[in-house]
Image (tube, rainbow, N blue to C red):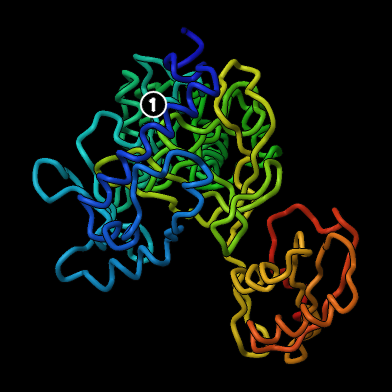
Amino acid sequence: MADHYDALETRDPAQREAALLQALPGLLAHAQQATAAYAQALRGIDPREVTSRAALARLPVVRKGELHERQRASRATDPFGGFSALVRGPQMPRIFASPGPIYEPEGTARDYWRTARAFHAAGFRAGDLVHNAFSYHMTPGAFIMEAGAHALGCSVFPAGTGQTEQQLQAIADLRPDAYAGTPSFLRILLEKAQELQADVACIRKALTGGEALPPSLRQWFAERGVDTYQSYATADLGLIAYETAAREGLVVDEGVLVEIVRPGTGEPVPDGEVGEVVVTTLNPAYPLVRFGTGDLSAVLPGPCPTGRTNQRIRGWLGRADQTTKIKGMFVHPGQVAEVARRFPEVLRARLVVSGEMANDRMTLRIEASGRPEGLATRVAEALREVTKLRGEVELVDGGSLPNDGKVIEDARSYK
């Protein structure tokens, strides 16, 4: 148990899946009854019938744009857009704002965002002092990390962002064991420490988030004695996945159910294919069901070498919202999916936009099972009907389209 946060991490995968699916009907019923947004979004759904991933996949995906619109429309009466099951007062100690603005409630549960698991996997332990350099201003990032560090038994120095020289002085005086924050600010601190000859050698480990951590930067930190790990969390969902000592993708948190879907749709893709990360969180205070993060990732095969048996994902691979303006009109990934859905022969589709400014050309490349006569012509007609734009259709060999999650590729020249 010393190597794992709790016994949940090493459960038999079938046991975990059964537990998640068993909890799902109760979560849906609660969301219907306790939140106005899901009373509407799940109208006509019998929660007792949602006991499989296939049944879950038939529910609508709620994306951040919809959350923002609902919040804006109901701001005078409900700043959370009908998604929160909490009311202001003792059960909601804080309210945060993310860019948009999107407002998020905080509940009272210990380790509300469930980040202690990520800290433990990164080697943090009770008694450590954590230099927390996420912002404490309006946004929840600092509190997301602080709550997990406290749950693990760590002390926290609320450094926040900026005032680099003062932060270096605090590090020299307090000798923290670890850092929490963005990787870019950790680099700024270490570079400034070298410039000023400040002693920051006490920081030997770091849990980062909010940005990608490329291998080159991880190596740069390692050369300076800092063992760096990634976490993947959002203000809406809390922890989604976290890195382990194996450094082989990110292990999904025990408190969420993750799907990877084709961008612009709610349709799950096969394991290994890149798509949008959609998350259902088992949080009764803020019960988000099939919440589209807008991030791209893919499922990795097999369990983590550290013995953790939950699903693994590759990490952040880009953004799923590929809405593109073509000849003055917006074309959405969902429209490309709609065209493909009309033809059972079409297995995958990718819209490529080429040409130069004011001379856009679009080509829909499709992988199809067989090449029935007239398929390209019929698909081109559907493409024009759905997008209101003319485009060519090119049939390509199966497996030739890149596995990068892109439904719309903007290959135009902007010189």
Compare residues 310 and 133 and report the one nearer the observer: 310
In the visual, does 106 lie left or right of 7?
left
Residue 134 location, quadrant = top left
Please give the residue where the numbered disc 1 appears in the rendered image: 116
**In the image, what residue occupies the spot 60% across and 50% down?**
268
Residue 28 visible within the image? yes
Instruction: Provide the secondary structure element on which disc 1 rests.
Output: helix
Instruction: State the image coordinates of residue 376 (x, y, percent, origin top left).
Output: 84, 77
Compare residues 213 and 14 and report the one nearer the observer: 14
Compare residues 255 and 167 and report the one nearer the observer: 255
Specify the farthest residue to the left.
89
In the visual, does 131 lie left or right of 371?
left
Instruction: State the image coordinates of residue 64 (x, y, percent, origin top left).
Output: 42, 61
Q: Amino acid at mark 1?
A: Ala
Q: Residues within 10 Å of mark 1 (few under 14, many from 20)?
A: many
Instruction: State the image coordinates of residue 37 (x, y, percent, origin top left).
Output: 28, 60
In the visual, does 72 lie left or right of 256?
left
Instruction: State the image coordinates of residue 68 (x, y, percent, origin top left).
Output: 35, 66
